Structure formats: C-alpha cells, structure tokens
C-alpha cells in the first residue's frame, strides 16, 4: 500500500507495541521501506485509543484524525482466526487517498474516539511503571504492576498480550490463546469497526 499510494502523499508508519527490540528488528527486516517505531511505553496506543491489535488510525495532512483506531489487517494470513477481510480496509484507504472519500464526518470521528475509563487509565499507569521497573532490572516489581494492570483491564489486548514478553510468556503460546478464549467469552470487546458496529465476522464463543 505504501508503494502503491506514496505518490499520492500517503505515508504509513508502523508502530510496534512491544518491549522486545530484537523481535521487532526481526519482523522489520521483512518490511523494507516502511518507517517503523517502537512504542514500549504505550504512548501511541494511549493517545490514539488502541486497545486491540492490529489497528490503524488515519491522520490527514492537517494532523486531524479522520478515522479512529479500527481493527484492520495488512493481509489475509490471519483471516481464519480474525475473520477480517483485509481488502475492505484497503479499498477504503484507496478511496480516501485517491478520491478524498471518507465514510465518517468529524462529528462521527469524535463520537467514536475512545474515552478511557478510570480503571483503564490506572491500568495504563501500572503498565508504564512496569516498563520502567523492568528496565531497571526489578523484574518482580514489574510483574506486580503488570498483574495489577491486567486485573484492571482484563480484555485490553495491548495490555494483556503486550505484557506477555515481560512475564516470559510466549505471545503466541498457550497463555495467549487462554486470553483469547476469555476475551471471546466476554463478547470480543474492542473488536469493532470505526462505524461503531460490531464486526460481522468477529470471533464468537462456541
């Protein structure tokens, strides 16, 4: 998409919500030409209301958000799991960049922007403290704060899955799928289109 639409002014910035630099570097090696930043402190995730990944945010040339955080896939390799057709998002992106077509006005964008609850704000604070403690070598202290964050925001993918490497947990392993099961049983919270409707293909508990 970057190569296709660059001459129309599109710039894609990939943000890795991760604390493992080596893991990001390994992935980035397969994405030459993309600008990639690491959001270890969740600054980008918090500012743009990202509670599920992967997500995209569209920002226009004047710095305005024209499509808030929206579940979107770069391709269809995880379609069987996520039930999201990547071509839908790609078509919408092409329509915006090529023809200026947006399906949300500014009032709708403002209405859909996340307004974090006090519990979520506290969870994010615990997660930030955990990163700082982990960087200082206080692994036990970091894990205490990660546990507090998970208790306050049990269905937030960014907090739950993003914290797994600091807990020495494989983010694609058994505990990740245990979390997915909990999240699905709760009704897949945060798995929404920017239209505000539940995604028709969102995973549902069996």
Image (cartoon, rainbow, N blue to C red):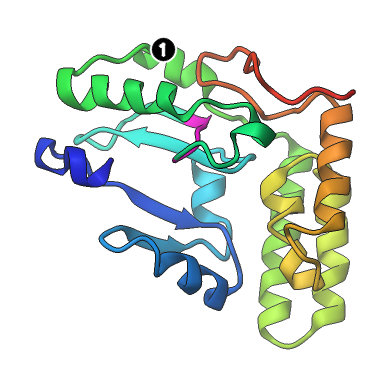
Where residue 186 appears, as percent x and y from the top left, is 86, 27
In the foreground, 163 or 43: 163
Q: Residue at x 59, y 43 (%)?
A: 53
Where residue 76 appears, as percent x and y from the top left, is 51, 36
* Residue at the farthest left position: 7
In this rendering, is residue 50 above or below 101?
Answer: below
In the rendered view, does 99 fall on the left or right side of 121? left
Q: Residue at x 60, y 73 (%)?
A: 20
From the image, which quarter does the C terminus lie in? Answer: top right
From the image, which quarter does the N terminus lie in? Answer: top left
In this rendering, is residue 73 above or below 133?
Answer: above
In the rendered view, does 29 fall on the left or right side of 118? left
In this rendering, is residue 23 above or below 52?
Answer: below
In the rendered view, does 192 fall on the left or right side of 72? right
In the foreground, 122 or 30: 30
The magenta region covers 69-74
Q: Residue at x 81, y 67 (%)?
A: 169
Residue 141: say if magenta.
Answer: no
In the rendered view, does 132 fall on the left or right side of 119? left
In the rendered image, which quarter is residue 187 located in? top right
**Category of crowding for the residue at label 1, using alpha-carbon neighbours closer than 10 angstroms: few (below 14), some (14–19), many (at least 20):** few
Q: Which residue is mark 1?
A: 107
Where residue 100 appears, as percent x and y from the top left, is 19, 18
Residue 70: say if magenta.
Answer: yes
Where residue 55 appears, as percent x and y from the top left, is 52, 39
In this rendering, is residue 193 above or below 134?
Answer: above
Q: Secondary structure at mark 1?
A: helix
Q: Residue at x 46, y 73 (%)?
A: 25
* Residue at the farthest bottom position: 137
Number of numbered labels in the structure image: 1
């Amino acid at each position: 998409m970057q190569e296709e639409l660059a001459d129309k002014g599109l710039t894609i910035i990939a943000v890795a919500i991760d604390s493992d630099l080596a893991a990001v570097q390994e992935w980035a090696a397969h994405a030459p030409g993309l600008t990639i930043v690491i959001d270890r402190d969740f600054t980008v995730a918090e500012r743009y209301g990202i509670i599920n990944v992967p997500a995209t945010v569209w920002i226009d040339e004047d710095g305005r958000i024209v499509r808030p955080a929206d579940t979107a896939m770069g391709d269809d390799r995880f379609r069987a799991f996520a039930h999201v057709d990547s071509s839908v998002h790609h078509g919408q992106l092409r329509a915006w960049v090529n023809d200026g077509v947006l399906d949300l006005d500014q009032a709708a964008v403002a209405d859909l922007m996340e307004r974090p609850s006090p519990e979520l704000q506290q969870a994010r604070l615990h997660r930030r403290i955990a990163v700082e403690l982990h960087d200082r070598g206080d692994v036990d202290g970091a894990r205490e704060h990660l546990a507090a964050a998970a208790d306050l925001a049990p269905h937030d993918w960014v907090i739950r899955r993003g914290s797994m490497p600091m807990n020495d947990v494989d983010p694609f392993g058994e505990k990740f799928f245990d979390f997915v099961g909990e999240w699905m049983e709760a009704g897949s919270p945060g798995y929404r289109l920017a239209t505000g409707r539940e995604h028709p293909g969102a995973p549902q508990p069996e």
